[in-house]
Image: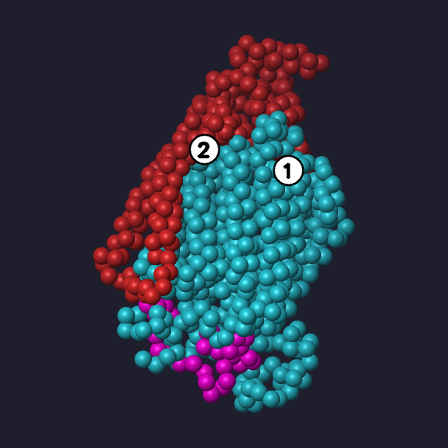
């Protein structure tokens, strides 16, 4: 998966791990099934004067060709379920302690980000509001509170492999921790009206020094 | 006097030949003959399919070459783009897959394959089509009202779909919802007919396990539809009230909940996938048995597996909502149920593949379509595992990976399944053979470009590209040249595929009038529809020659017989 898009959060690797596991297991079944399928088409093509066989599929030794693969498919499912639920639990259910909390607000058609200011507390006078630009510090655990002012939106950060719908009337908390610095896309992943395609934002993952500098500059700019 | 013409039972007494010729309007537009109604559904479905394909052409052009003036449409605005994708999805599922696979094939095949002269409720049948036609007209009209057609995606999530202030298509969204609701009424009426007819009108001697698989599948699908559609109709009424008289069922500021709609919608929406899948599987099973000259590998296995799939499909709906803000613990339960559904589906595919073993396979055009169904649907099936697994779905949800996945299921179902059934039963429907060479040109000209449309979209999805975005230039990571070349490959493949459909329509019309005469049973098949004239007259068989059934439908290659087939109606 990294070939398609870099991994920039602590759990991106484990989500990609589930994807790779599934790819291996179903890839095996897929190739096997298609292989047998095309081989059978070739092997049993019509030849003049040769009649087809009369097989009912009722005999035990014949049925095994269905039941054994069948049990194996079920076994693969169990592996996939275990891997998937473990990752899900880490990403969505069990939130680690936060170093900082931000608020993400979707509305037609922009993302507003509320950062805690110098005091690192949300909903205080020094909060920094930005539209379309989210600034976070690398290797720090963030909680985000996701809200919507009008319709459904979805906060999606592909490099984090993170996605969560925003619902009007509710505040949904999630978490992430970035692992490398850089600027990346934030998309809205739930259709939200004619401006859905322009509801873009950028996430700026900064090292500690740059981030502190940004907070200082932004605070200075907003302080009356 | 329309009623005397259409009363089947009276007709029987009057005998088959040599009496009044009804006016053509009565015969073709006001008929209660199941074959005429099937044709009405088939051609309405095909017409809607052409419109759906045209929409795909317009928005794929916009995606590959943003901002160009699309030939035959003009420049695409964001609102028009949303409306195009919404109605493309709605049309292809509700006005193409369902009318063709269930209504057209169900109406045509059920009486003919069970040896009945018509459906048990011919007038309900006529009403069903008429309501369907009205729903199609309302849907098409919704595209031309002030503000344009509805653009909130075929899933129609509120609050976007509920409030004109948010979607800016006040009238369009209400008309869209009305059209969908009427379409459901049409299919409820049709479903009653299918189930009742199969249960009551079978030829003497036809026991439950002698019924051809395609009929079982259509009837199971009708039952699934009837059981699942109730919650959605309730939801649709609430949404309609929210839209028109400003109630607050889905408005959180007034005590409503937008997520409620998602549960009601997907409680229907997931069984709906199997509603259209099962008939396509039934068609494929019948065609494979005929052209492999083989009994299917476990009749009861297929039947019970299909029922199990149907039952399981009621317990998986929230896998569409993993990241929608539902209680995260629910995702674990629905991951388990969703992955379990891979077991019966894998079994159905294994059985179809195993049926080929020991066969004498003839690669006619319908057989190619049936085999392509298996080969392509497998891709759709295995990619679904990624999305059913909650952990992987966090990333893939609402990306082009999802889009490519369900097109790899719906395209085999709605397009490959339709062509498979149509080319197989064409000789029965029109009395003439289709041209096999043209059929094969059309087959390869459809299948190869199809893969080149959707494989690039899988890659785009893995690269993080989301759905329903009309222009990716606002996202620097999605606006790179490699991304655009993938989109262009998909669009150009679509153009090639659409161009090859001309071969199909030419073949259809040419064969209809000029094709080689088919005779009663051109494929040497076993089922009852091949025992009557092609095309069958009114009443299907002369009243004194109604068939009697002596065996199951798949007795191919029986060792006691010289021929490799043994029709159901021949006494031992």
What residue sits right under mark 2 in the picture?
A92
Drawing shade for chain B: cyan
How many numbered discs, if any? 2
- Quadrant containing the N terminus of chain B is bottom right
- Please determine whether, in this image, residue A219 is positioned above or below residue B521: above
User: How far apart are labels 1 and 2 at the CA level?
Assistant: 35 Å
Q: Which residue sits at x=68%, y=54%? A: B174
Q: Give the camera-side residue of B450 and B266.
A: B450
Hey, which quadrant is residue B17 in on the image? bottom right
In this rendering, position of residue B433 left or right of residue A32:
right
Magenta residues span B529-557
Colouring used for the render: by chain
Is the residue marked by circle 2 packed among few (<14), some (14-19), or many (20+) residues within 10 Å? many
* Residue B283: percent from left, percent from top: 46, 62
* Residue A29: percent from left, percent from top: 36, 44
* Residue B45: percent from left, percent from top: 60, 61
On what subunit does the disc labeled 1 rest?
Answer: B
* Residue B203: percent from left, percent from top: 42, 79
What residue sits right under mark 1 in the picture?
B64
- Please determine whether, in this image, residue B137 is positioned above or below residue B432: above
Q: Secondary structure beneath disc 1?
A: helix
* Label of residue A210 in the image: none
- Please determine whether, in this image, residue B215 is positioned above or below residue A85: below
Q: Which residue sits at x=69%, y=59%? A: B138
Residue B419 is inside the magenta segment:
no
């Amino acid at each position: 998966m990294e070939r398609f898009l870099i991994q920039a959060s602590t759990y991106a690797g484990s989500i990609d791990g589930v994807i790779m596991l599934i790819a291996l297991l179903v890839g095996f079944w897929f190739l096997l099934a298609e292989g047998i399928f095309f081989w059978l088409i070739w092997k049993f093509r019509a030849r003049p004067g040769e009649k087809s066989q009369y097989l009912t599929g009722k005999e035990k030794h014949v049925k095994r060709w269905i039941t054994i693969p069948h049990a194996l498919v079920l076994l693969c499912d169990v592996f996939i379920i275990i891997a998937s639920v473990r990752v899900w639990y880490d990403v969505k259910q069990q939130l680690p302690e936060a170093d900082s909390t931000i608020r993400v607000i979707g509305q037609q058609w922009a993302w507003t980000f509320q950062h805690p200011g110098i005091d690192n507390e949300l909903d205080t006078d020094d909060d920094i509001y930005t539209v379309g630009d989210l600034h976070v510090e690398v290797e720090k655990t963030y909680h985000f509170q996701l809200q919507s002012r009008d319709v459904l939106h979805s906060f999606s950060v592909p490099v984090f492999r993170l996605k969560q719908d925003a619902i009007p009337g509710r505040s949904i908390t999630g978490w992430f921790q970035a692992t490398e610095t850089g600027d990346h896309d934030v998309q809205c992943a739930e259709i939200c009206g004619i401006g859905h395609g322009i509801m873009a934002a950028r996430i700026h993952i900064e090292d500690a020094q740059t981030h502190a500098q940004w907070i200082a500059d932004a605070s200075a700019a907003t302080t009356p | 006097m329309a009623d005397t013409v259409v009363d089947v039972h009276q007709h029987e007494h009057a005998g088959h030949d040599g009496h009044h010729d009804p006016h053509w309007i009565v015969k073709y537009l006001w008929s209660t003959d199941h074959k005429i109604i099937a044709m009405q559904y088939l051609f309405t479905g095909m017409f809607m399919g052409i419109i759906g394909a045209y929409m795909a052409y317009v928005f794929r052009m916009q995606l590959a070459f943003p901002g160009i003036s699309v030939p035959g449409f003009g420049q695409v605005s964001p609102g028009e783009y949303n409306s195009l994708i919404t109605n493309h999805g709605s049309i292809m599922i509700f006005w193409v897959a369902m009318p063709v696979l269930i209504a057209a094939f169900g109406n045509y095949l059920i009486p003919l394959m069970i040896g009945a002269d018509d459906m048990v409720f011919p007038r309900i049948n006529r009403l069903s089509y008429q309501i369907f036609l009205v729903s199609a007209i309302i849907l098409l009209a919704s595209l031309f009202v002030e503000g344009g057609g509805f653009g909130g995606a075929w899933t129609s999530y509120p609050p976007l779909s509920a409030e004109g202030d948010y979607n800016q298509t006040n009238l369009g969204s209400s008309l869209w919802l009305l059209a969908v609701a009427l379409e459901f009424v049409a299919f409820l009426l049709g479903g009653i007919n299918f189930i009742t007819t199969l249960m009551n009108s079978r030829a003497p001697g036809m026991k439950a396990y002698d019924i051809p698989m395609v009929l079982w599948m259509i009837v199971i699908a009708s039952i699934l539809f009837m059981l699942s559609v109730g919650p959605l109709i309730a939801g649709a009424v609430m949404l309609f009230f929210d839209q028109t008289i400003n109630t607050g069922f889905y408005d959180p500021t007034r005590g409503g909940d937008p997520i409620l709609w998602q549960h009601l919608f997907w409680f229907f929406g997931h069984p709906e996938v199997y509603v259209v899948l099962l008939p396509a599987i039934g068609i494929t099973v019948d065609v494979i048995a005929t052209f492999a000259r083989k009994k299917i590998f476990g009749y009861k296995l297929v039947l019970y597996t299909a029922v199990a799939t149907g039952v399981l499909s009621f317990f998986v709906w929230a896998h569409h909502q993993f990241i929608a803000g539902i209680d995260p613990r629910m995702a674990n339960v629905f991951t388990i149920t969703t992955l379990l559904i891979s077991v019966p589906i894998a079994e159905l595919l294994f059985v179809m593949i195993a049926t080929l073993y020991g066969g004498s396979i003839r690669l006619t055009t319908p057989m190619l379509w049936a085999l392509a169904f298996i080969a392509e649907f497998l891709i759709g099936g295995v990619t679904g595992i990624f999305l059913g697994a909650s952990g992987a779905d966090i990333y893939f949800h609402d990306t082009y990976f999802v889009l490519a996945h369900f097109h790899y299921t719906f395209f085999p179902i709605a397009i490959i399944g339709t062509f498979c059934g149509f080319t197989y039963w064409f000789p029965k429907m029109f009395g003439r053979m289709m041209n096999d060479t043209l059929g094969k040109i059309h087959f390869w000209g459809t299948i190869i470009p199809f893969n080149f449309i959707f494989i690039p979209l899988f890659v785009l999805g893995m690269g993080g590209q989301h759905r329903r975005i009309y222009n990716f230039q606002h996202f620097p990571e999605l606006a790179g040249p490699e991304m655009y070349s993938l989109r262009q490959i998909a669009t150009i493949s679509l153009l090639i595929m659409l161009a090859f459909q001309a071969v199909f329509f030419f073949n259809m019309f040419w064969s209809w009038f000029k094709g080689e005469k088919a005779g009663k049973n051109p494929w040497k098949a076993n089922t009852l529809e091949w025992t009557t004239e092609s095309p069958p007259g009114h009443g299907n068989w002369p009243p004194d020659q109604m068939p009697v059934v002596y065996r199951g439908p798949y007795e191919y290659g029986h060792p006691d017989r010289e021929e490799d087939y043994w029709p159901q109606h021949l006494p031992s």
